[in-house]
Image (cartoon, helix red, strand yellow):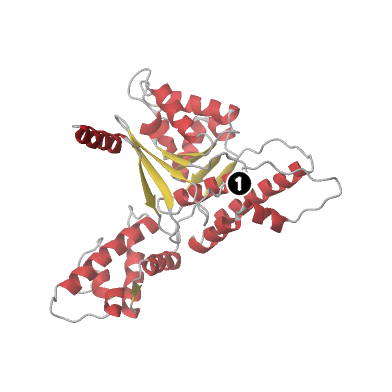
Amino acid sequence: MLLAIVVISVFVAMVGGTTALAISGFRSGGKATEETTVASETETRRTLTPQRSRNGRSRGNGRAAVPLPMDATVTFGAEREEAEIDDILGALDRDLVGLLPIKKKVQEIAALLLVDRARQRFGLEAPRPNLHMCFTGPPGTGKTTVALRMADLLHRLGYLEQGQLVHAMRDDLVGQFIGHTAPRTKRTIDRAKGGVLFIDEAYYLYRGVDSQDYGQEAIDILLQVMENERDKLVVILAGYKDRMDKFFGSNPGMSSRIAHHLDFAAYQLDELVTIGQGMLKQARYYLSGEAEAAFRSHVTRRMREPQFANARSVRNDLENARLRHAHRLTSEPNRNWTRDDLMRLEPIDIFAGRGDPELEPGTF
């Protein structure tokens, strides 16, 4: 009887508890973060926490700056080392193809906070900088990846207490009935405090043509928090540039609270090919010479499609190539395959139908 009770208790705890999963996004260089999924009645929210150092502790550095005498000196190489930010900046530069303006902006924000830390050590106080941001650009250009790295960076520099990233969309903030929106919005904000609230497709919060919509209530709450509690969290709005511009035009108060606008341009062909090769290398695959030419031809054609999602589409297409590769090899059960055969993708794996891209247009 006692054993049955214990078993039931363990089962309930497993079902009702929070499940932690280790994940790594594309172009992450294999570094894992933790993803915690919390289910509620009508919505699923996602929280990404900062990376851990080699010794297992949180890499965030929220320590108070040690005061220095008036005649002391500092070096920013030492400041960077103490804050442990070089690996974040290095990973951005190494793992993200292109995005030079984005990387420069991240470096500028890091430099500002480093200088602020040094000034505080000399007793030179300044107002806390506003770091609410807007990330614009087509899908698959690295907005979520940069937001996650930004959260970790701000934590290590002492700007954020925890550095988690809470990913939210309209349904996480806006209710369907009177009285539902305020508690839903506040609950999401509370989970983000100490870190970054990343609102994807933020323009869907506002539906001016619908007088019964409650999105404006969520926006009003966000405006108050962004102004009065910016020492507790950073808000990043994300979406297509033209739609975000229209959203800001309808909500000038929101526009005035965004200090940094980062535009993620669509990738060029060479960048997408490099991204794809990097994904394959991480998975221990590679393209033969003929397959690389086929892949380049395929990506060129895919880029003209309206639903093309840059690196996200490349990732999905390569997953399909791996499926075809696996099917091709296992369809000859008595043939001897080498280690290299298991790694090498051929044109027939890139295009369905004897390697001819015209046989199935729009597919991969």
Look at the picture and state if 358 lies above or below 146. below
Residue 342: quarter of image: bottom left
Badge 1: how crowded within 10 Å, few (<14), some, or many (20+)? many
* Nearer to me, 326 or 315: 326
Residue 48 location, x and y as percent? 44, 44
How many discs mark residues in the rendered view? 1
Q: Is residue 265 visible?
A: yes
- Residue 304: tell me if it is visible: no
Residue 335 located left or right of residue 138: left
Camera-side residue of 258 and 80: 80
Which amino acid, mark 1?
Asn
> Of residues 112 and 58, which is closer to you in this image?
58
Left or right: 312, with 76 as reference point: left
The residue lying furthest to the right in this view is 71
Query: Please, what secondary structure does the residue beneath circle 1 have?
Result: loop
| Figure quadrant of the N terminus | top left
Q: Quadrant of residue 168?
A: top left
Q: Which residue is mark 1?
A: 61
User: Residue at horizontal 47%, vertical 28%?
Assistant: 219
Q: Residue furthest top?
A: 178
Query: What percent of the width, then of the height, locates residue 132?
Result: 56, 38
Residue 113 drawn at (x, y percent): 66, 46
